[in-house]
Image (cartoon, helix red, strand yellow):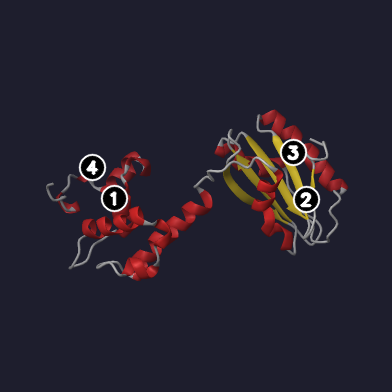
């Protein structure tokens, strides 16, 4: 196999950064994306050599990537390792969909478990695709001890961008009282109406306390 040419030897439109600018990140191979992240090589290792070695680590076990394993590669500084680890973490948090669908109430509650111990009211929205798989989970608003306010446009704005097939809304009651308040009832009615209008139905609204939960769907209120 012929050796890969160095970046400065490539035609400008074939260089990773220029290619990404012209065609978007999706047009780049994994190798080229790594070259963009790395930026520049060192006197002892050009950017292509470094990218190939990191690519081998990725193909072997992404979970094993760490500062130690990356900086063990000649030419990888702590700054470069940090950029790679940060990009992977951002992807994990915001872009990678869960493979397993959220079919049951327990599946959904498991995703929301961290809300139970919050000291303020958090309003969270789960965007789901047509197979009931999670596209994204977002905190929309954070309220006071017992009040969280939201408008339907805030709840559905990202779901529209996600092209979600449905949403689940959840919030916690730090007070420990799981019964919906009048504001909860009004908000649920507004969200259900907005979802129907937008074609993104409200699959459920769940209220959580440390030990209990209330599901509008389970109570046949949706």
Q: Which residue is mark 3?
A: 191
Q: Marks 1 and 3: in contact by CB < 8 Å? A: no
Q: How far apart are the two marked residues, 4 and 2, measured between alpha carbons?
A: 53 Å
Going 81% across and 58% down the picture, which residue do you hit?
146
Q: Is residue 128 above or below residue 147?
A: above
Mark 2, secondary structure of its residue:
strand
Marks 3 and 4, how far apart in space?
Answer: 48 Å
Give whichever of discs 4 and 2 has the lower sequence position: 4
| Quadrant of the snapshot with the C terminus | top right
**Which label sits in the foreground, 4 or 2?**
2
Q: Earlier in the sequence, mark 3 or mark 1?
A: 1
Q: CA distance from mark 2 to mark 3?
A: 15 Å
Q: CA distance from mark 1 to mark 4?
A: 16 Å
| Residue matched to label 4 | 13
| CA gap, disc 1 and disc 2 | 45 Å
x, y percent for residue 36: 31, 53
Mark 2: few/some/many CA within 10 Å (<14, 14-19, 20+):
many
N-terminal of the two: label 1 or label 2? 1
Q: Mark 2 or 3 closer to N-term?
A: 3
Query: Badge 4 local density, few (<14 within 10 Å), some, or many (20+)?
Result: few
Q: Tell me the residue that label 1 is attached to.
A: 31
Q: Is residue 52 visible?
A: yes
């Amino acid at each position: 196999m012929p050796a890969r040419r160095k970046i400065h030897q490539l035609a400008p439109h074939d260089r990773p950064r220029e290619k990404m600018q012209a065609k978007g990140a999706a047009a780049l191979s994994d190798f080229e994306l790594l070259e963009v992240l790395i930026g520049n090589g060192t006197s002892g290792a050009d950017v292509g050599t470094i990218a190939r070695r990191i690519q081998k680590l990725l193909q072997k076990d992404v979970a094993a990537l760490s500062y130690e394993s990356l900086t063990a590669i000649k030419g990888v500084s702590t700054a470069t390792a940090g950029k790679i680890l940060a990009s992977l973490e951002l992807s994990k948090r915001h872009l990678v969909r869960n493979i397993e669908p959220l079919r049951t109430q327990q599946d959904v509650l498991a995703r929301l478990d961290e809300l139970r111990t919050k000291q303020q009211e958090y309003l969270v929205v789960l965007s789901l695709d047509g197979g009931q798989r999670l596209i994204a989970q977002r905190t929309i608003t954070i309220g006071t001890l017992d009040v969280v306010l939201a408008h339907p446009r805030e709840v559905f704005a990202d779901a529209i961008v996600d092209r979600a097939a449905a949403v689940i809304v959840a919030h916690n009651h730090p007070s420990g009282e799981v019964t919906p308040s009048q504001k909860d009832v009004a908000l649920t009615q507004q969200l259900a109406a907005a979802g129907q209008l937008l074609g993104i139905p409200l699959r459920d609204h769940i209220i959580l306390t440390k030990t209990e939960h209330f599901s509008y769907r389970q109570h046949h209120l949706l």
